[in-house]
Amino acid sequence: MSSLHKSRIADFQDVLKEPTIALEKLRELSFSGIPCEGGLRCLCWKILLNYLPLETASWTSILAKQRELYSQFLREMIIQPGIAKANMGVSREDVTFEDHPLNPNPDSRWNTYFRDNEVLLQIDKDVRRLCPDISFFQRATEYPCLLILDPQNEFETLRKRVEQTTLKSQTVARNRSGVTNMSSPQKNSAPSMNEYVVLPNGCEAHWEVVERILFIYAKLNPGIAYVQGMNEIVGPLYYTFATDPNSEWREHAEADTFFCFTNLMAEIRDNFIKSLDDSQCGITYKMEKVYSTLKDKDVELYLKLEFLLPDVIRIWDSLFADSNRFDFLLLVCCAMLILIREQLLEGDFTVNMRLLQDYPITDVCRVLQKAKELQDSQ
């Protein structure tokens, strides 16, 4: 370890040992990258994402409260509904004249169950292929959720729901005349259970933890639920927390990831709401801002016109540290384009799209340095 790196670690430790964290100083240090030694990155991210307050004396009580709250979410949204579903084959109390599997009433418990299954299948499909360049998410977590895996609790887990929905369920649709049509789901509509390694009882893969986080978020936020791409946001957060050198932090990675992800989504959720795409807070407007910024910085390139996980984490150090983090993200996008301007100016649309999809610059620090230059020139 170089003396410069040791000095940076010491600078972070000095800031973090104060009774009240100096947020601006922490942001300034974090912008240039947070060391992973000693769990510094995990702690800094939790502060920068407003999960932990600046007063360090309250950290222990707040963490205990939030982790217990997450356990309550698991009981209410996975375990209790799973117990009720598991009991349906024994007691038919859930099938009544007023409420039954074909009930079209949107408030029906059955209707809610089927809607949740649709969301769950999409989440499951996405998280199973999360970060395919590394094997981490396919491996078993050393801290499986005991609430979920308790052998004395006989209930329908998310894993069972996916398997049963994929293999047995039928698609229910109503035509204009009100007649209910039932048809088997299409082949390949969900991933085959045989495509993935099945872990023994009592174990669960990291991707299953991420699946649970996203499912709970979707249940608590029905207005947005789950949209493809959220898995790419929660993945690096969970990876960072679940690989922390501190065993206590790792043990609670699921709950801590959930609340950090929720806080982050509060800032960017408008990008995931389709009805807002063309509004000032939607994704279309944000992309137009990228182009307008690029036009201001490099008009010639404007007229012409994926990182690995460790690089994503390094970029997020700078994004989380910036007080206007998503304005800086626009500059990162522009920097990526400007750094390959010559290739883009020479290529046609098809060539350029391939170039952008397989971005050639592997030194993420070059991109961040260029983004900082663009920021300082404003």
Image (spheres, rainbow, N blue to C red):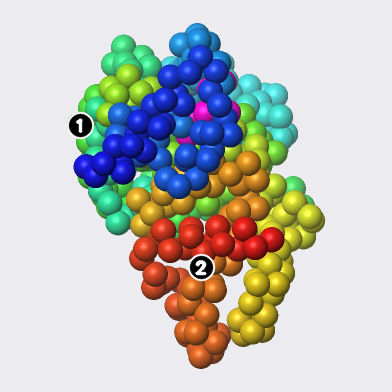
* Secondary structure type for disc 1: loop
Q: In this view, does 32 lie to the left or right of 337?
A: left
Query: Label 1: which residue?
Result: 200
Which quadrant of the view contains residue 109? Answer: top right
Q: Residue at x 69, y 61 (%)?
A: 378
Of 284 and 292, the residue lying toward us: 292
Residue 179 vs 252, above or below: the answer is below
Which label's residue is closer to the chain start, 1 or 2? 1
The answer to whether one can see residue 30 in this image is yes
Q: Is residue 48 magenta?
A: yes
Percent coordinates x, y for residue 356 in the rendering:
48, 73
Q: Which residue is drawn at 56% across and 26% down?
A: 22
Q: The residue under label 1 is which amino acid type?
A: Pro
- Which residue is pictured at 58% across the width and 55% down the height? 329
Q: Neighbour class for label 1 at 10 Å: few (<14), some, many (≥20)? A: few
Quadrant where the image shows the N terminus: top left
Disc 2 marks which residue?
A: 336
Q: How many marks?
A: 2
Q: Looking at the rendered structure, which numbered label has been put on residue 362?
A: none
On screen, residue 51 versus residue 103, left or right, reads left
Q: Give the range drawn in magenta.
A: 45-53
Disc 1, disc 2: CB below 8 Å?
no
Q: What element carries label 2?
A: helix
Residue placed most toward the observer, 371 or 221: 371
**Which quadrant of the view contains residue 241?**
top left
Q: Position of residue 111 (x, y in %)?
A: 63, 34
Q: In this view, does 248 lie above or below 192?
A: above
Provide residue 148's location: percent of width, then percent of height.
37, 21
Residue type (three-letter) at the residue carrying disc 2: Met
